[in-house]
Amino acid sequence: MPSIPALPPPPPAVQVIDGRYQNPAQSFRDANGVTWTINLMAQATANGAPDTSTSGVWHMALVGGRIWQGTFAGNWYYKSHATDATWTPGSNPLPAGQAVRIADFQSTMGVGVRFSDPNTNPTALTNALHYGGWRVARADIGDYDSPLMRAPISNGVRIIYSFLNSGYSQSSVTSTLSAAVSANGVASFFGVAGPNESDVGVNNAGQTRADMTNLGAGVAAVPALRGVVPVIAYSVTNYNAGNGYASSVGDLTSRGVHWADVHSYVNSGGVSVQPGSQNPNFATAARGMMAIETPQRRVICSEWGSSGPTQAFTQATRQASGKFDVNTYLDAWSAGMPAITAFSLMPIDGNGQWQLFDESGNPLNTNAADWIHNFTTIIADTGASARTFTPGALNATVTGAVDATTVAGTAPYTDPKYFIAQRSDGAFVIPIWNEPPVQTGSSPPSDVAPAAVSVTVTFNQAVRSVQRYDYMLGTSVQQSASNLANGTAFSVSLTGYAQILVVTPAVKPTPPPPPRRRRHRQLGLGLAG
């Protein structure tokens, strides 16, 4: 009896990894059993060995059996085996609508926290962090042994341990971080950062270089952290003020620094503006600072915010502040940032200017605190595999009126913006946002109702349902449609803040199993004699 041939294996799913996610780094395994990652130096690594011919690697992908790397410059290269001598140039191999994990996006959303503030109610702090859905907290390294850190860390919040004051030694860095590892575990680390706003706090390029040398060497001397968590540069007040100082300090990569840091209180003339409207715009400022300090790698924003209408530094109405907050998180992720942390969760030593909650956990800026809560509630993926499943693709296009404004000294900043993400239950999440002015430039500012921009989402595949959410109105569905055929359009109106679509694709019917081949015993026929 001839054997039944085995069915061919299904084609491998497209797998994509992003170098902004570390501790642990994302990875995939190719057909030859080689595990690929992107290390902190932005190099492709095969089974832990860096490929020194690569640099500026931001993404890697496994598509059609080939290993691909996508660079900061937007170029793609591939090879078929880890042992191939060179990478071959190619075009972006990702399918249309390739999704990212929505939980990966949420993992970049952070807030500054003073864990040792004696005025803060511990339960209120834990509840406020949970309410906002934040996954990163920037904290003073001196707070590492604060009991207030325990609950957030156990709930999955990771810490940017920051040596906020200049003048530390390598040995003090190593001993302090070793104690933090013992107290909270390696998994609690998002990264280790340098001094706060050195362009104004230190204003001495030689001292800053020494600080960063000691920080890089101090982290490297802790085996549990070396090559696992990023060393993050000193911060500067903002790109316009800080780029000259950063240029005098110079490239920090030879000092063991992996990522840059820039603060960005988005404002013009003391009045807050949309993050895409400041000069230079948010994404351009971030990349500009990275190009100086850590070329072709990453940059975080460890401090940003917009205050109330009477604060002299940067003014925003309650409503505008809430819109700026969510748009800034979306813009930061789109700019490739591993994290952005708002300043701050609660008042620090009783000083409350930009804070979201008071020490008792009551929202100070109800629009911002509640709208961030609504936004993270809408996009949340609570599945066990939220950070590990392999996302698919949703074939959809977004078109509509484009608000292309040229900011002096930068490339045109184009609205609307969107990206396609997916939850582990299979539903796709599409945030769509635009950034026209939403308040006047006067002091104090007043709210402005921008003209609505109509955007059309066309689904180039069958869709079971589409639900639209508006975080300003709560967490319930505002618009829905069911059983959309291939080519169906769905309209969305934008007025300066994000709308979120949750799309459930049509389920392809499961084909029936092939018929089982029955084996029959051959019977001999004879004639009775």
Image: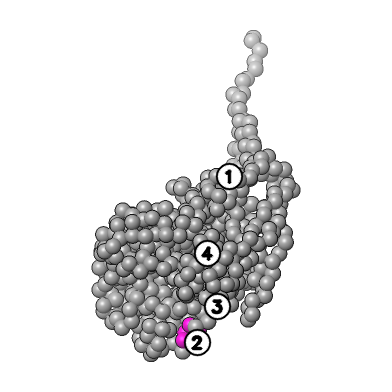
Taking the magenta stretch, the answer to whether it contains residue 350 is no
For marks 3 and 4, the one nearer the N-term is 3
Q: CA distance from mark 4 to mark 2?
A: 32 Å
- Above or below, 268 against 208 in this view is above
Q: Which residue is under mark 4? A: 317
Q: Residue at x 43, y 77 (%)?
A: 235
Residue type, numbered disc 1: Val
Mark positioned earlier in the residue sequence (4 or 2) = 2
Q: Is residue 380 above or below residue 453?
A: above
Give the number of the mark in front: 1 or 2: 1
Residue 104: x and y in percent read 49, 58
| Helix, strand or loop status at disc 3 | loop
The first of marks 2 and 3 along the sequence is: 2
Of residues 226 and 78, the one nearer the viewer is 226
Location of mark 3 (residue): 269
What amino acid type should be assigned to the residue bearing mark 4? Thr
Name which residue lies at 31% across and 83% down: 167
Say which residue label 2 marks.
Answer: 244
Circle 2: is it few (<14), some (14-19), or many (20+) Cα within 10 Å?
some
The span shown in magenta is 242-246
Q: Check if mark 4's residue and mark 1's residue have beta carbons within 8 Å.
A: no
The residue to which callout 1 is attached is: 477
Q: Residues within 10 Å of mark 3 (few under 14, many from 20)?
A: few
